[in-house]
Every structure is written in structure tokens, then in C-alpha cells.
């Protein structure tokens, strides 16, 4: 006697449905039509490749730094914590209340529980995350 077929699991069913939809020429035709219509409707749609523009994945990276209560950056201004000469740019700060400040001014105070979005070389970002550029440089000089 043959073995009874088992019922497909929800994951298998979903996977099969996704495969069928993405390989369907009808779905492809509809998606191409919708995309063409959207591009005609919104011709100024920004389509830049920010990864290439910012040289991400190579020599530069964007990272988030969580500032805890005991972090060396807490209570310091952006200018003193991230001097222009260090090669990093603070792109934004998300405060504990979820408010976001893009390109914060130098006098902006970094608070405990803030999240900094930083652009620069990964080694410099790591140094900043470890407690600040000056702290990292003092450790290197010691």
C-alpha cells in the first residue's frame, strides 16, 4: 500500500502562493503597467541610489549609536562629542520620546536614551560608540 499524502503546512502553502504570484506573467504585466503609470503620474519621483552616492559598503557606513545612561556621550553637545575634524557626521538624533532631529546643530545636547545616526568610516563610528572620539584617542595615545 502507498503512503498517504500529508497536508501542506501554512508555510509551504504561503511559499507556493508567493512563488506562483511572482512567476506569473499576468502579475508581471499588471505590475509593469502599474509601475509605468506611477512613473508617468509622478515624474519627479526621487530615484537615487543612496548606497552608491554615500559610498556605503566600502569605506563608509551609516550606523546607529544607542546612548545609554552611563555612555560617555550623554550630556555632551554634538560639537564636543563629534568634532568636525574626526570625519564623522551626525545625520540625526532620535530622542527617547521618538521625536527626530535631522542634522542637529553643534549645540544640540545628546541625552541619555538618544539614538544617534552617524555617517563615516566604520572605525571612527566604533570609536564614537565606545565612548567618544577623544576617549578613543586618549586610549590609543596611552
Image (spheres, rainbow, N blue to C red):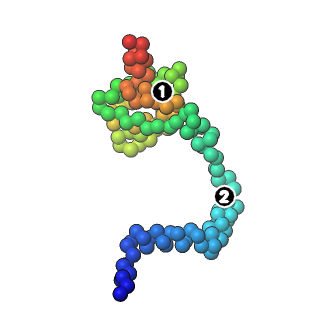
Q: Quadrant of residue 23?
A: bottom right
Residue 136: x and y, percent?
41, 21
Residue nearer the viewer, 78 or 66? 66
Q: Secondary structure at mark 1?
A: helix
- In the picture as drawn, the residue positioned furthest to the front comes out as 1
Q: Residue at x 55, y 33 (%)?
A: 60
Residue nearer the viewer, 16 or 141? 16
The residue that label 2 is drawn on is: 42
Q: Secondary structure at mark 2?
A: loop
The answer to whether residue 30 is visible is no
Q: Residue at x 35, y 40 (%)?
A: 96
Image height check: is 141 above or below 15? above
Residue nearer the viewer, 7 or 18? 7
Residue 88: x and y, percent?
51, 28
Is residue 49 rendered to the left or right of residue 19?
right
Q: Residues within 10 Å of mark 2 (few under 14, many from 20)?
A: few
The tag on residue 124 is 1
Q: Residues within 10 Å of mark 1 (few under 14, many from 20)?
A: some
Quadrant of the frame with the C terminus? top left
Residue nearer the viewer, 37 or 109? 37
- In the picture as drawn, the residue positioned furthest to the left comes out as 70
Q: Quadrant of residue 58?
A: top right
Amino acid at each position: 500500500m502507498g503512503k498517504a499524502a500529508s497536508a501542506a503546512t501554512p508555510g509551504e502553502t504561503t511559499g507556493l502562493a508567493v512563488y506562483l504570484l511572482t512567476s506569473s506573467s499576468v502579475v508581471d504585466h499588471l505590475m509593469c503597467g502599474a509601475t509605468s503609470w506611477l512613473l508617468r503620474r509622478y515624474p519627479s519621483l526621487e530615484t537615487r541610489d543612496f548606497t552608491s552616492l554615500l559610498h556605503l559598503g566600502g569605506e563608509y557606513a551609516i550606523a546607529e549609536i544607542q546612548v545609554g545612561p552611563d555612555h560617555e556621550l550623554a550630556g555632551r553637545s554634538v560639537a564636543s562629542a563629534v568634532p568636525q575634524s574626526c570625519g564623522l557626521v551626525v545625520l540625526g538624533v532620535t530622542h527617547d520620546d521618538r521625536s527626530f532631529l535631522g542634522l542637529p546643530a553643534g549645540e544640540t545636547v545628546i541625552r541619555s536614551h538618544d539614538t544617534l545616526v552617524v555617517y563615516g568610516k566604520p572605525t571612527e563610528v566604533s570609536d564614537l560608540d565606545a565612548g567618544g572620539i577623544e576617549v578613543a584617542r586618549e586610549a590609543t595615545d596611552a
